[in-house]
Image (cartoon, rainbow, N blue to C red):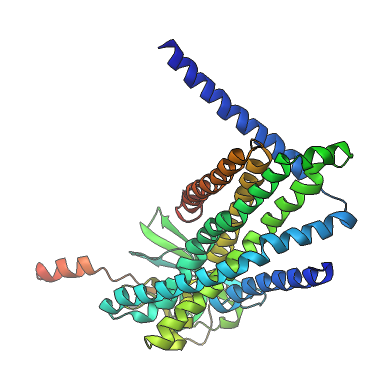
Amino acid sequence: MRQRTMEIVVGAFVLAGCGALLFLALQVSGLTPQAAEPTYKVYANFNDVGGLAVRGQVSMAGVTIGRVTGIKLDPKTYQARVEMEINKSAEIIPTDSSAIIRTAGLLGEKYVDVSVGADQSYMKDGDTFYGTQSALNIERLISNFASGK
Amino acid sequence: MIDRLATIGRGTFDILASLGRSSEFLVRSLIAVPRPATGLPLLVKQIYAVGVLSLAIIVVSGLFIGMVLGLQGYNILTDYGSEQAIGQMVALTLVRELGPVVTALLFAGRAGSALTAEIGLMKATEQLSSMEMMGVDPLRRVIAPRFWAGFITMPLLAMIFSVVGIWGGMLVGVDWLGVFEGSYWANMQSSVDFGEDVLNGVIKSIVFGFVCTWIAVYQGYDSVPTSEGISSATTKTVVYSSLAVLGLDFILTAVMFGDI
């Protein structure tokens, strides 16, 4: 085969491979080429985080507005202190809002749902949620039911 | 008794010597980068032989593996009423595991054996030694372009394999079995992570490309220059490459996804 034809075929092959990677990135993994949005940090203290994990979603009305960046045990209160990064565009959380740990679907992942309050002022960087509701623990629920509490 | 001990010792020496020779060979062919003017056409020719000609087997196998994944996945998932998750299953299986591994196995059989046989025959017909006598370094002229060609083509082939497989899974899942197309893609996009899944798959295929090509060219270069020697070198290439790929795959998976 002539050198030029071969070069063209190899060029097409390399392009096809790169195109495949691009397809995997955009169509399969749903990667959107956008710069990371600026965020601010808020905290919430839970009695029980259940199966909440770092990188879990934080959502408001079902829309993702941030993610969980850290979960620590507070040695004073024996509560779990969850650190969240919220997008700047969602800096409209009223100060009396509460954070609730919910499960996506029946057996899905745990995420933090922000239940919107009615206050006129908004939460700022470093603030802590006023009210929280811990993860629903099915085992505890059943044992409470069985013992008649 | 003493004889047996000596046999074990000799075997160990042989293995160590072979490892040493292959490492030295690897380093020498890696630093022997050809000059761009002469090297680039050689590299293009090898990418054509190793990559473009392997495309047919990769595409066909990828399509069938994707279709089988779609079919098997549907049969299991439909028991739980969650056949929408088929896209996620097909994509994760292909991108993380089957794409890199099956491509590497097919590559070892299709391209690796050809590399070994070609270099082995060059050695048997003393083309390599005549090159040396003409003052041409065979490592630079023959081995390095083949090595780099395998190294470059493997990730490309694995990507193409995964994409064709995902398309095959859609063919069976969506067009034949009637899963809603939107949920096929949406489930896939929400569960496949670019850094975690796709890039780790690419890293796997780069490692496999390196190992398979290294084994193939070394077995050819080190073969006994007889027809028997070449045939045993070709067999060794396929066997060693397959074992190395499967073993390395376990190690890489444990490191990447096993939280070690």
A90 left or right of B47 in image: left
Q: Residue furthest top?
A: B2
- The residue lying at 54 percent from left, 70 percent from top is B162
Residue A9 spot, x, y in % from top left = 74, 72
To which quarter of the image does residue A24 belong? bottom right
Relative to B31, is B151 above or below? below
A139 left or right of B207 in image: left
To which quarter of the image does residue A49 belong? bottom left
Of residues B77 and B108, the one drawn nearer to the viewer in this rendering: B108
Q: Is residue A149 visible?
A: no
Of residues B99 and A34, the one drawn nearer to the viewer in this rendering: B99
Residue B225 spot, x, y in % from top left = 67, 37
Q: Is residue A5 visible?
A: yes
To which quarter of the image does residue B134 belong? top right
Specify the quadrant that holds the N terminus of chain B: top left
Relative to A1, is A77 above or below? above
- The residue lying at 38 percent from left, 71 percent from top is A109
Residue B92 spot, x, y in % from top left = 47, 68
Of residues B126 and B44, the one drawn nearer to the viewer in this rendering: B126
- The residue lying at 42 percent from left, 81 percent from top is B172
Of residues B12 and A140, the one drawn nearer to the viewer in this rendering: B12
Relative to B18, is A145 above or below? below
Label tally? 0
- The residue lying at 70 percent from left, 70 percent from top is A13
Residue B174 spot, x, y in % from top left = 42, 86
